[in-house]
Image (cartoon, helix red, strand yellow):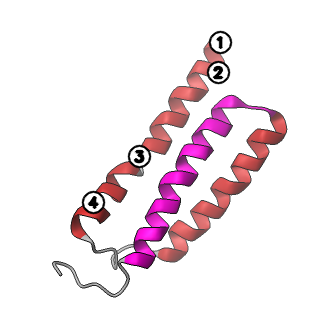
Amino acid sequence: MDTITLLGLAAAFLTSVAFVPQVVRNFRRKHVSDLSFSTFGTFTAGVVLWLIYGIAINSLPIIAANVFTLGVNALNLWQMWAYRGRAEGS
């Protein structure tokens, strides 16, 4: 694997793993009313398009990052649905 691909994989890892703490926080609090569904929904749609692009150009860093990020953000969107209407601390 060349240096540029490794650089891309490192960037992909860091930007993708950035969403994991939010998902963990959601699970612990069971509260997401302070999150924007439109922001996460729009971002997730963009991730799907990046994934399609990565597949089209056969780019491992883009594919790997967006598969992982799609999974994490799908979980985040599910939490926003599952915990909707819950007040903080309930």
Using the numbered discs, state the Cα–Cα distance from disc 3 to disc 2 in whole angstroms. 20 Å
Figure check: 83 above or below 60 = below
**What is the spatial separation of the Cα atoms under label 2 and label 4, in whole angstroms?**
32 Å
Q: Amino acid at mark 2?
A: Thr
Q: Quadrant of residue 30?
A: bottom left
Q: Earlier in the sequence, mark 3 or mark 2?
A: 2
In x, y percent, where is residue 7? 57, 22
Say few, some or many: other residues with alpha carbon within 10 Å of mark 2 (under 14 / 14 to 19 / 20 or more): some
Q: CA distance from mark 4 to mark 3?
A: 12 Å
The N terminus lies in which quarter of the figure?
top right
Location of mark 2 (residue): 5
Q: Which residues are magenta?
A: 58-82
Please tell me the numbered disc located at residue 25. Answer: 4
Cα distance, mark 4 to mark 1? 35 Å
Give the x, y percent position of residue 44: 59, 61
Q: Please name the residue that numbered disc 3 is placed on.
A: 18
Judged by its main secondary structure, the magenta piece is: helix
Q: Is residue 73 above or below residue 54?
A: below
What residue is shown with label 1? Answer: 1
Q: CA distance from mark 1 to mark 2?
A: 6 Å
